[in-house]
Amino acid sequence: MTRDALLSVRDLSASVDEKTILHHVDLDVAPGEVHVLMGPNGAGKSTLGHVAMGDPTYTVTGGSIVFDGNDITELSTDKRSRAGLFLSFQAPVEIPGVPLSSFLRSTLDERPDMKMKNKQFRKTIKELACELNMDQAYLDRELGVGFSGGEKKKVEMLQLLLLKPKLAILDETDSGLDVDALSVVSQGMDAYRERCDGTLLIITHNTRILEHLDVDRVHVMVRGHIVAEGDASMISDIDENGFEQFIGADDASEAHE
Amino acid sequence: MDAKTIQHVNAMPAPTWHRLHMNDTDVEIPAGLSVVHEVTTEIPAALAGAPDAFDAALAAEQVEWEKTHPEKTPEQRAEEERLRTEEEKTTYGGTAYSRYQIGADAIEEARSLARAFETGMGADAYAWMREVAGDPIVIAAPAGEPQEVAVRVAAVPDAVNVAAIDVVAAPNAEVTVVLSVDSPREGTGVTGTSLRVFAGTGARVHVVRTQTDDATFIDMDDAGLFTAENAFIDVRQTVLGGAKAYTGLAGDIRGTASRIDIDTRYLGHHEQQRDFNYTLRHHGEKTLCNITANGVLSGTSKKTYRGTIDLVRGCKGAVGQETETVLLADDGVVNQTVPVILCNEDDVVGNHGATIGHVRPEQMFYLASRGLSQEAAENMFVRAIMEQAAIDAPDEPSRDGVMRLGSHLLDNFEGFLDEEEA
Amino acid sequence: MPKKRTQVADIDRSMYDFRYDDSDEEKLQAGLTPDIVREISAKKDEPEWMLEHRLKSLEIYNSMPVSDWGPSIKGLDMDNIVTYVKPNTDQKSDWDNVPENIKDTFERLGIPQAERSYLAGVGAQYDSELVYHSMQDSAAKMGIVYSGIEEALHGEYADLIHEKFMTLITPRDHKFAALHGAVWSGGSFVYVPKGTKLDYPLQSYFRLNAKGAGQFEHTLIIVEDDADLHFIEGCSAPKYNVANLHAGAVELFVGKNAHLRYSTIENWSKNMYNLNTKRAIVDEGGSVEWVSGSFGSHVGYLYPMSILNGRKARCSFTGITFAGQGQNLDTGCKVVMNAPETSTSIETKSISKSGGVSTFRSSVVATPKAEGSAASVSCQSLMLDDKSRSDTIPAMDIRCKNVDVGHEATIGRIGDDKVFYLMSRGIPEEAARTMIVNGFADPVSKELPLEYAVEMNNLIKLEMEGAIG
């Protein structure tokens, strides 16, 4: 399975401020598949997404991350991105003084195969904005500044569709709270799957976001450990019984350390 | 014209250590320039004002102001004198005010709006600019429908091209003043605008100045503003070009509940110099001011920003705010900032904040996660200032200037706002 | 309608205002000439290089202009300032041997009591000379030196002093640094050897008793690598109707990973021109903490400076200035970040009342070597009435891209809502306002040794009394 996996996380441990958040995590995602990473609040799900993307806030203390056949454990974040990895943020940062369109242009300028002329670029992003029901005026507004929750999600989905990554890790931990955001993300995921035959790793603890998706595999994380894996049927199980059933498993895995 | 050095330009009112070289600057006008007046205006005939409109408006306002600010009675003066003498006895000669503090008190004592009126670059620069500009363009906006006027200064090779502009907004008038300064032809020289604005009771004046000179020109932007009761002036200055760009603005926020807002955006690159001086003096009760400055410095550019909010005795209920954000994109840059608050009134709020530095770590991670290296991120900030200026340009000629300069500076800039025909 | 408030009574400063006749002290004639400088030097039997330094400094003093940006010093006529006043005693190490009037002065200021209760050593200067110097045996055994600097010029560390003396604050720095170089007298020398940590503070107290005199003490402190010291400085003077001048100099050398805290409560009388200069240089991983309270003086110019000269060197400055009637206090600090990953934290408070003028003035400089450094500056000013003045003039000069400088300043008065809230719980207005001002000053007072914090709160209380109508 490892050979075929697009993303292969092996025995990965990571810490922040000397506190270990991820413990010996193993996770594989094959091309074209849809995976879901679930778990209660504070389990370390978002951390896994950020560590996969190379967030310097975290220190990898052991293990490896292989993406598309290359070990990217030490690779800088921008190179991971250009290699085809994408992480959506729960809330993109605000960058005053930088119009959204300028930012989007810069992301494309860094990818030789995606460079386009201004007119074509402008047309492309307007079409994407239109598809995502996003007011075009937002393209000229400063990145993130004064955007609502739904608009921030649209900005993330727009980038997903613009950059067409090989693997998208969608950190949707909070999306379940906002109906608008939820529908934006669903729409973005559908378009991405359809157009790019995209591979998805969706991070969530709310199953509503998964309703229209064919999920290939579910991973459950509790306190920084992967404690269970299974097929899509786990989703309805979790829906009914919650995460309590896995807490014991977590204790057991800790006992092995 | 001979070479000329104008000294003490953009001087901050209350100076600090000379060793820091921040108190003021000198403007060097190169030798051999001729004086030209290549200025185009778009001013509806109904808005043409009499040559002395500004001074007349200030003189009329003096009369009104004195009605609500009567002179001290002899009894009050005697009492003040008594307290002063007493204080001198008990406090070893009285308070040892600084030269600035004594000067500031003298101006208030003089009770003359004309004497208190100033422009940001200072008297010497003002006098020189008015001299080379010739007769001022006078705009007198009547109450009624909002009006828009434009004054465009084109840099002329081997010449000094300065426009003097007086704007007098009648009570409840609303007028937008677009100033665009651009260098369509190559060469060296000086551009400038010398602006005075009088906003009458309840008037609203919007000033938008966009400067897109090539890096071979010097630009001087001098302004002095006055607000009567309930008047509101907002100024947006975009400084994108010029080897040296000097921006001086002084505002007398005189009338009750009047307000001045300043929004400045600038870009410094290569060896360019940017020099700003803002002095906003709250005289009236419940007056407001808001200064926002955002800039990006790259290459070995140098910027000095002086921003003074002066809460003058009597401005009860005034609120002054100042925020400066600078992004340093290269190691060779020099960034000097002095955000000053002067205050001799207690019932006021004065705030200022400055953030100077590089892209914050969480911003950088976000940008990196979309494929931008640190260098690419820095380039993006430079580009963004230009693109934002084009997006926000007040009219087509201003935008054309931004596009012209942007295309010189950046790859693949032309046409970024254009769209393919649907 | 503006709120009516009663006139503020002059502050009761009597606790500092007692004074003794200075007629039996030995004074040099007023004014400043090379002969006077030679005479001071001769009296001190000091090395030749020091006399040269003094004469050179005098030349520089005569050639330098007075600053044109700060409070007026017109009232300071150098021809009338007595630069050297020798008390009628030599330096003692036992209070019982100190002449009665001088001993009584320090008793009333609480110095011997403090020495007994929480200090590791004390130096006391009366006018131009140290009259008392003593340190606990335990500290001496650790190799710590705390003595009069003139005494040290003849001792084991004479060469070290020669090497460092007025190298941080050179006579060219400003006019009064040059004056200090010419006529300095008294002050302390502290040497803390490598790895030595002193658990209790050392304290120097400066008392200027003579009318129309100047005090020019020099403090030189060397804290070697990995060592730790807390030094406290106190100053006061009785009030006269002629100008007194204080132009001391403090030079601090902080070694690698060493730590020095320098606390000052300045409460000179209100005829004092306090033109003091303080400077620290900090090596790799070291830190200097300044805690500074300025209450007294007619005119104050005081900006302790930190030069962060080694990787990860740190400085913090916590200061409060309280300017009342007739006072123009121009205070703040200066920092130069001249090495990678240094950090600076500045927090100041100022209060202006009864026509007093308080100016916060600072400069934060990051040189091209300051890669990865950070500075935060926060200053808050409180206006207690509409007769006073409070100015904030912070300069920043940043020449390195990977630095992070944040600055914020606010100015305003005590919120009516806060006073109303406290009064609604039965607290009288004056007590409520005093409480709020004390709270405002709290970040500074909590950094002070307990005795000084109590003194500061008392000073604030004194200043606040009668402030309410």
Image (cartoon, rainbow, N blue to C red):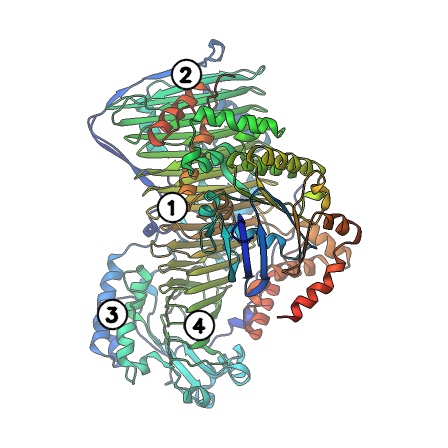
Chain letter of disc 3? C
Front residue of this view, candidates C52 and C139: C139
- Mark 4 residue crowding within 10 angstroms, few (<14) / some (14–19) / many (20+): many
**SS for dot 3:** helix
Judge left or right: residue C189 versus residue C64: right
Is label 2 on the same chain as label 3? no
Residue B51 - label:
2
Question: Residue C106 shows which numbered tag?
Answer: none
Q: CA distance from mark 1 to mark 4?
A: 31 Å
Q: Residue at x 32, y 83 (%)?
A: C151
Looking at the rendered structure, the kind of residue marked 1 is: Asn
Judge left or right: residue B395 versus residue C248.
Answer: right
Question: In what element is the residue under mark 2?
Answer: loop
Residue B335, disc: 1
Mark number displayed over residue C260:
4
Mark 1 or 3: the one toward you = 1
Quarter of the image that includes the N terminus of chain B: top left
Q: Nearer the viewer, mark 1 or mark 2?
A: 1
Q: Residues within 10 Å of mark 2 (few under 14, many from 20)?
A: some
Label 1 crowd bin: few (<14), some (14–19), many (20+), radius 10 Å = many
Disc 1 and disc 3 on one polypeptide chain = no
Distance between mark 2 and mark 3 Cα atoms: 64 Å
Question: x, y (%) of residue A229?
Answer: 67, 55
**Circle on res. C54:** 3
Q: Estimate how packed mark 3 is, as few (under 14), some (14 to 19) or many (20 or more) residues with alpha carbons within 10 Å.
A: many
Q: Label 1 is found on which chain of the structure?
A: B
Marks 1 & 2, CB-CB < 8 Å contact: no
State if disc 3 and disc 1 touch (CB < 8 Å).
Answer: no
Is residue B6 depicted above or below C458 in this figure?
above
